[in-house]
């Protein structure tokens, strides 16, 4: 029996420009998340950066059931690669497409 991996996606806004394409930023975010979640929960949650929408906005994919833990860990991260940065969760969804639609609505309202 093959089970499909179920993910939840979290739209995150940073307080400053953050490029997740830069491996240093991605590694620092992983390390900060792992520090707050712990090894076992981090392994079970398996947070992955799945999309960079703009300089301050990106999407993290998380195994279903652990999205609250990752959101909580992101709220405690205050520094990324030596810079003061805060992370705010805007929306959690089952598809990236719905997050992109939500983001387009936010961007259009500004």
Image: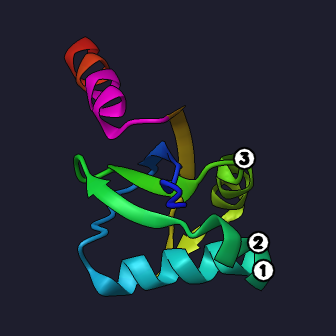
- Was residue 102 drawn as part of the magenta stretch in this picture? yes
Crowd band around label 1 with a 10 angstrom C-alpha radius: few (<14), some (14–19), many (20+): few
Determine the CA span between mark 1 and mark 3: 15 Å
Q: Residue at image x 48%, y 54%? A: 4
- Was residue 59 drawn as part of the magenta stretch in this picture? no
- Which circle's residue, 1 or 3, is located before the other in the chain? 1
Determine the CA span between mark 3 and mark 2: 12 Å
The kind of secondary structure the magenta stretch mainly shows is helix
- Which circle's residue, 3 or 2, is located before the other in the chain? 2
Q: Residue at image x 55%, y 41%? A: 89
Relative to 107, residue 49 above or below: below
Tell whether label 3 touches label 1 (CB within 8 Å): no
Q: Residue at image x 74%, y 55%? A: 69
Q: Position of residue 82 (x, y in %)?
A: 49, 83
Relative to 70, residue 67 above or below: above
Relative to 10, residue 91 above or below: above
Judging by the rendered image, the residue that carries numbered circle 3 is: 68
Tell me the SS state at disc 3: helix
Q: Position of residue 44 (x, y in %)?
A: 69, 70
Judging by the rendered image, the residue that carries numbered circle 2 is: 41
Determine the CA span between mark 1 and mark 2: 4 Å
């Amino acid at each position: 029996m093959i089970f499909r991996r179920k993910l939840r996606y979290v739209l995150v806004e940073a307080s400053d420009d953050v490029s997740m394409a830069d491996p240093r930023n991605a590694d620092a975010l992983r390390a900060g998340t792992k520090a707050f979640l712990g090894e076992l929960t981090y392994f079970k949650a398996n947070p992955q950066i799945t999309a960079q929408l703009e300089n301050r906005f990106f999407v993290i994919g998380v195994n279903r059931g652990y999205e609250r833990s990752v959101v909580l860990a992101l709220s405690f991260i205050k520094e990324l690669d030596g810079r003061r940065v805060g992370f705010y969760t805007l929306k959690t969804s089952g598809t990236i497409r719905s997050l992109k639609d939500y983001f387009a609505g936010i961007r259009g309202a500004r």
